[in-house]
């Protein structure tokens, strides 16, 4: 066991102790800033959409068309950040300070390399994927120009994601939230200046986002290099450690595959809905936009419980880790079920606000909401328990359950109901309920009996 550094004393007042104290208080203290940070991260796209929407249909379409390619690369790279935060949480729980700093530095090296490679690949291959998904040639140039700038931002984006996750893993959850809030506000302030004052158009939105992300990364690096944090990285920590990198890839690659296949699965569901016409595709977009708004805090709960479980496993308190998982699952189920119930009567008002002057489209969009809203609590349970498995380092198990949920239950259900029964496109909407029910049953059974309990801390 090693003592903490001076930076730990400086950060103590802003850290959450996860291995002691009432679990409900710990979970709330960890989860609330992470949930808010996730919501703010999603706000980047809303801010850009607000200002780009004033440039016309082509500008809106260009930004929308860039989403699938950028989203897949973002999902693939997110696994390394997951691996770093899982390992750091367990080593922090075991009070292995030098190991924590070493893992943090190696994670940053890996993230820098992968994000730079993704940025280069994105720059060199921006146009062919646009043609593959059917983007019109007249629009492809504008979309590719936007992507060429957005891809540069992958390096600071991935870097801050990794730093944020690592700080959350040691209990410094408020810093990441404050930086994210400032970054979103800066992006909102720069967008109109770059788009309209400098007349950079769609490119201005991308430049504003990249600028805000660079500043966020700079603040994160200052935090972990200056001694102001429990993470206190020095030059020697950045010496490449190939053995650790192979270990981190073993943890991070399944998490990347899980995130990427979830994104790809959503594209498949969208393509099924598109077979029923433009209105069905519009309904899918409206319904999923509202659903993902609530999925964001659910994923915040999943990230929070991964940190709590990881620290307690590292501290040798498996019983407390399991109790935290059960409590967080019940908490997520109660809160999201209540939100889902309230969403049902609110759906017509929300959808009419999203589609002014189109009552039929709003009515059809409500049928999507009615299909998944009652089951949002189940979605929370499954995602929280998947977070428990990740916190234990069992990312392959989490990946396998996610793949089974989407590819063995949701997609076949959507296809069969849509094309082989009279319900048509409603089958796509109801596939979400089937998937959430199946995923919940599987994750509960695995939580009770599966071999997910393990420690990643060497020498314990």
Image (spheres, rainbow, N blue to C red):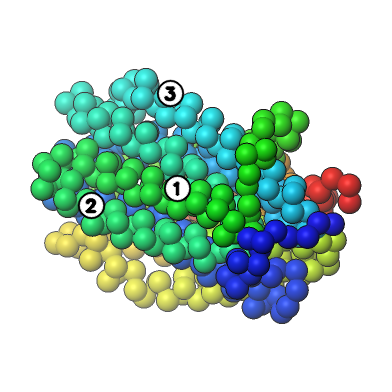
**Which label is found at residue 190?**
2
**Image quadrant where residue 449 sits:** bottom right
Of residues 255 and 132, which is closer to you in this image? 255
Residue 251: in sight, yes or no? yes
Q: Which residue is mark 3?
A: 121
| Residue positioned 27% across, 46% down in the render | 208
Q: Is residue 426 above or below residue 171?
A: above
Mark 1–mark 3 distance (CA, rounded to whole Å): 22 Å
Kind of element beneath mark 2: helix
The reply to whether callout 2 and callout 3 are in contact (CB within 8 Å) is no
Q: Where residue 97 sits in the image (x, y, percent)? A: 74, 54
The reply to whether callout 1 and callout 3 are in contact (CB within 8 Å) is no
Q: Which residue is mark 1?
A: 217
Of residues 76 and 427, which is closer to you in this image? 76
Residue 83: in sight, yes or no? no
Mark 2–mark 1 distance (CA, rounded to whole Å): 17 Å
Kind of element beneath mark 1: helix
| Residue positioned 58% across, 70% down in the render | 14
In the rendered structure, the answer to whether residue 202 lies left or right of residue 13 reads left
Viewport quadrant of the N terminus: bottom right
């Amino acid at each position: 066991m090693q003592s903490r550094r001076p930076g730990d004393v400086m950060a103590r007042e802003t850290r959450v102790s996860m291995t002691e104290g009432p679990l409900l208080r710990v979970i709330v203290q960890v989860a609330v800033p992470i949930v808010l940070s996730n919501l703010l991260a999603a706000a980047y796209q809303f801010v850009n959409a607000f200002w780009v929407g004033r440039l016309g249909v082509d500008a809106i379409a260009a930004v929308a068309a860039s989403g699938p390619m950028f989203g897949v690369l973002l999902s693939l790279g997110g696994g390394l950040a997951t691996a770093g935060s899982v390992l750091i949480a367990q080593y922090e729980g075991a009070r292995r300070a030098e190991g924590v700093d070493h893992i943090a530095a190696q994670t940053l090296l890996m993230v820098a390399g992968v994000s730079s490679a993704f940025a280069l690949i994105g720059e060199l291959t921006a146009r062919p994927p646009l043609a593959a998904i059917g983007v019109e040639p007249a629009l492809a140039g504008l979309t590719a120009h936007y992507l060429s700038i957005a891809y540069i931002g992958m390096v600071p984006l991935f870097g801050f994601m990794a730093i944020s996750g690592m700080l959350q893993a040691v209990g410094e959850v408020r810093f990441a939230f404050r930086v994210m809030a400032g970054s979103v506000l800066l992006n909102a302030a720069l967008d109109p200046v770059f788009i309209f004052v400098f007349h950079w158009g769609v490119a201005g939105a991308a430049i504003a986002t990249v600028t805000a992300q660079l500043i966020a990364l700079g603040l994160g690096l200052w935090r972990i290099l200056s001694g102001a944090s429990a993470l206190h990285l020095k030059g020697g920590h950045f010496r490449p450690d190939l053995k650790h990198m192979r270990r981190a890839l073993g943890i991070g690659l399944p998490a990347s595959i899980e995130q990427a296949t979830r994104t790809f699965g959503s594209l498949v569901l969208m393509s099924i809905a598109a077979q029923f016409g433009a209105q069905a595709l519009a309904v899918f977009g409206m319904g999923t936009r509202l659903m993902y708004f609530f999925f964001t805090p659910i994923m915040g709960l999943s990230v929070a419980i991964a940190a709590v479980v990881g620290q307690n496993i590292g501290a040798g308190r498996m019983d407390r880790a399991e109790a935290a998982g059960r409590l967080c699952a019940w908490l997520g189920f109660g809160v999201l079920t209540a939100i889902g119930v309230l969403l049902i009567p609110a759906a017509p008002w929300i959808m009419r606000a999203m589609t002014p002057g189109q009552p039929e489209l709003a009515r059809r969009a409500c049928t999507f909401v009615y299909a998944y809203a009652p089951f949002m609590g189940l979605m929370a349970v499954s995602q929280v328990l998947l977070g428990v498995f990740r916190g234990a380092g069992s990312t392959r198990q989490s990946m396998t359950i996610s793949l089974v949920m989407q590819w063995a239950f949701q997609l076949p259900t959507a296809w069969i109901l849509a094309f082989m029964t009279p319900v048509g496109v409603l089958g796509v909407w109801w596939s979400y309920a089937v998937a959430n029910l199946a995923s919940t049953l599987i994750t509960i059974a695995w939580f009770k009996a599966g071999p997910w309990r393990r420690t990643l801390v060497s020498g314990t």
